[in-house]
Structures are given as structure tokens and as C-alpha cells.
Image: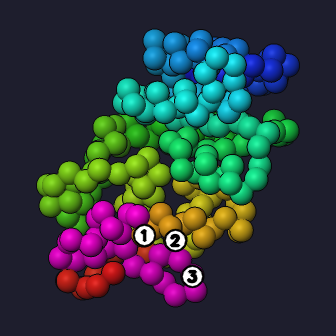
Amino acid sequence: MRILIVEDEKKIANFMKRGLGEEQYEVITAADGEEGLRLALAKTFDLIVLDWMLPKVDGLSLLKNLRAKKNRTPVLMLTAKESVDDMKTVLDSDSDDYLTKPFAYPELLARVRALVCRSEQERGEQVTFADIRLDPVAHKVWRNDQEISLTIKEYYLLEYFMRNPNQVMTRSMITEHCWNYTFDSFTNIVDVYINYLRNKIDRNAGRKLIHSVRGVGYVFKEGASRAKI
């Protein structure tokens, strides 16, 4: 597995490279956003560990550029910022996870393993449920053979539901899986993204699939036809 680390603080970059190297990952580093973007576009990586504040090109701009070029490599964003507004900025970006500095190495390793595992799963076969079809390689979704455009967060949320149908998912479970966060104070973000997803896959369909479980969370299952959402 190959990992790109884009981090301008040399001590932190070397710390991560040494630790992940001992876990048998192939690690390549870049000290600024310009070099990081060049490497990310020139080589194939299983994960990019990306600092937010970088010289030349900042992390969010780098990520936006990658996604605009249809590069879907999982990205773990690192930053010393930790306000609610900063958290929202990262959640609304196309990063796959978020880790604040300073961090402990075991936490970094756990998040790296989770994202690499997700990357491996995405190379698998298409997933289907009811009249929805999801392609984990192309990151495309169809309902009744009509393609639906989803953001990366909406996509991961739908994929989680489709891989776990007919099971009640709490908000904390969804938050931890889709964003790798365990902070209860941020679980309301789940409701926001559920509404986004419902508007795209359920609103114009004859049968809704995302159901609320009062006081608990949500379940993905076939429901009554033409139900209101």
C-alpha cells in the first residue's frame, strides 16, 4: 500500500513516515502543496495524508484540484484548527477524515487503516439493493437505471446503508463510520446529510428507502410506495 504524506513540518512528516513505514506501508512525502499535488496526480496512492496549512498551495485547494480532476484517492486531513466552523469546513470538503494536531500515533494508524480498508472495498463488485445500484470503483449510483450525482460524503453514507440494509444505524454509528468521528456533539451533521441524500434518491422515487427510527437513528429498507419523506 502506498501513502502520500503532504506535510511541511519536517519533524511531523518524518514521525509519520517512520511509523507507517514500520507497518509495511510505502510512504512518499512532500513538503508543500505544489509538490504534493504534482505527486498525487503523477502516481497512484491508496491514501493521502494532507496538512491543511501548507506553503504554495493549501491543503483544501489541493484537495479541490484533485477532485476536479476526478481523483478519488481517500484523503485524511490534518490541522491544528479545531473550532466548530473549521470542522464544518472539513466536513463540507471532499476529505474522507479529519485529525487535529497534536495527535497520538495509534489514532493516526487506526484512521489510516480504516481509510485504506475502505479504499480496498471500493475496488470490489457493484452493490445493489432494491432498485439502486452502486459502483464502488467509479463512485457512481443509479436508481431505476437513472444516474444520481452525489457528493463524496453522500456517497459514503449511501454505501454504508447499502452494505448494511435492514439494520438500524444510530447517528453515532454513522458518524464514526462515514467520518471516523466519535463526538456526540457533531452527530447532528448526520441529519443534515440524510436530508441531502433523501432529496436525491427518495424524493422522486415511488418507494422510499431511508427511514427514520424515532430517538435512535435510521434504517435503509424497502418501504411503502409513494410514501412522503
Q: Which residues are magenta?
A: 196-218
- Residue shown at 31%/37% (left/top)? 138
In the rendered structure, the answer to whether residue 214 lies left or right of residue 186 reads: left
Which residue position holds label 2?
Answer: 191
Residue 143, position as x, y percentages in the image = 20, 60
Tell which residue pokes out farthest to the left in this image. Answer: 145
Which residue position holds label 1?
Answer: 195
Q: Amino acid at mark 3?
A: Val
- Residue shown at 85%/38% (left/top)? 102
| SS for dot 3 | loop
- Residue shown at 49%/33% (left/top)? 64
Give yes or no for contact between labels 1 and 2 (Cβ–Cβ under 8 Å). yes
Which of disc 3 and disc 1 is earlier in sequence?
A: 1
Which of disc 3 and disc 2 is earlier in sequence?
A: 2
Residue 161, position as x, y percentages in the image = 42, 63
User: In the rendered image, which quarter is residue 117 located in?
Assistant: top right
User: In the rendered image, which quarter is residue 31 located in?
Assistant: top right
User: In the rendered image, which quarter is residue 16 located in?
Assistant: top right
| SS for dot 2 | helix
Query: For this rendering, which residue is in front, 198 or 123?
Result: 198
Q: Is residue 17 visible?
A: no
Residue 48, position as x, y percentages in the image = 58, 28
On screen, residue 66 above or below 189: above
Which residue position holds label 3?
Answer: 216
How many angstroms separate mark 2 from mark 3 (CA)?
Answer: 12 Å
